[in-house]
Amino acid sequence: MSTNNGNNCHPQKDIDLDLLIFIERYATNLLKWDILTFFGHHPNNQQTAQDIALEIGRSYRAIRPELGDLAMLGILNKFDNHNQPKYQLTSNPALRSLTLKFSRGKPSVSSLQDRAFIS
C-alpha cells in the first residue's frame, strides 16, 4: 500500500523574492517588460526613445511615457541630448544585477518576428 500523501507530486521550487519584487515594481505591463528585457540584453547602450522603439518593435508614442516612468523609478538614467533624451540602464549595482537576471533566458525582443498582437 502506498503512503504517498501528494507531497512528491509537485516539487517545491525556490522563489527569488528579490526578482519577484523587481517584476512587481518595474515590469508592470508588457511594454515595460520589453523595455527592461532590451536594457538587460544591452546594459551599456545609451539610446533615444525612437531607437529603442525601433529595436523592440513598438511605437515611439507608446514607449516615451514608459521610459519616463522607468527613469523616475531610477531603473533607467536619462541624459539630455538636444531635445532627444537618451536612456541607459542605471549604474546602481543592485538594480542593474536584477535587470540582467530578469532578462536572462528571455529572447531579444528585436529577434521576435511576429509582434503584431502587441501594440
Image: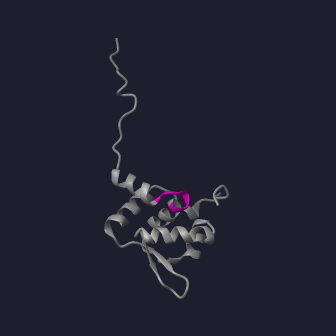
> Foreground residue, 38 or 105?
38
Residue pictured at 33% horizontal, 70% vertical: 92
Q: Which residues are magenta?
A: 27-32
The answer to whether residue 113 of the structure is visible from this angle is: yes
Q: Foreground residue, 54 or 86?
A: 86
The answer to whether residue 31 is magenta is: yes
Who's the residue at 40% across and 70% down the image?
Answer: 74
Q: Percent from the top left, x then y, of residue 83?
A: 55, 85
Judge left or right: residue 53 versus residue 22. Answer: right
Q: Please name the colour scheme applied to the rendered image.
A: one colour
**Residue 113 falls in image quadrant:** bottom right
For residue 87, above or below residue 36: below
Q: Which is more toward the observer, 11 or 84? A: 84
| 5 is higher (above) or lower (below) than 118 | above
Query: Residue 71 lies in magenta, yes or no?
Result: no
Q: Quadrant of the C terminus?
A: bottom right
Query: Which of these two is toward me, 71 or 100?
Result: 71
Residue positioned 32% across, 68% down in the render: 93
3 up-or-down from 56: above or below: above
Report whether 79 appears left or right of 96. Answer: right
Return the x and y of residue 40 as percentages of the image width and height.
Answer: 44, 65
Q: Quadrant of the image for the N terminus?
A: top left
What residue is at 51 percent from the left and 77 percent from the top?
47
Look at the image and tell me whether residue 108 can be seen. Answer: no
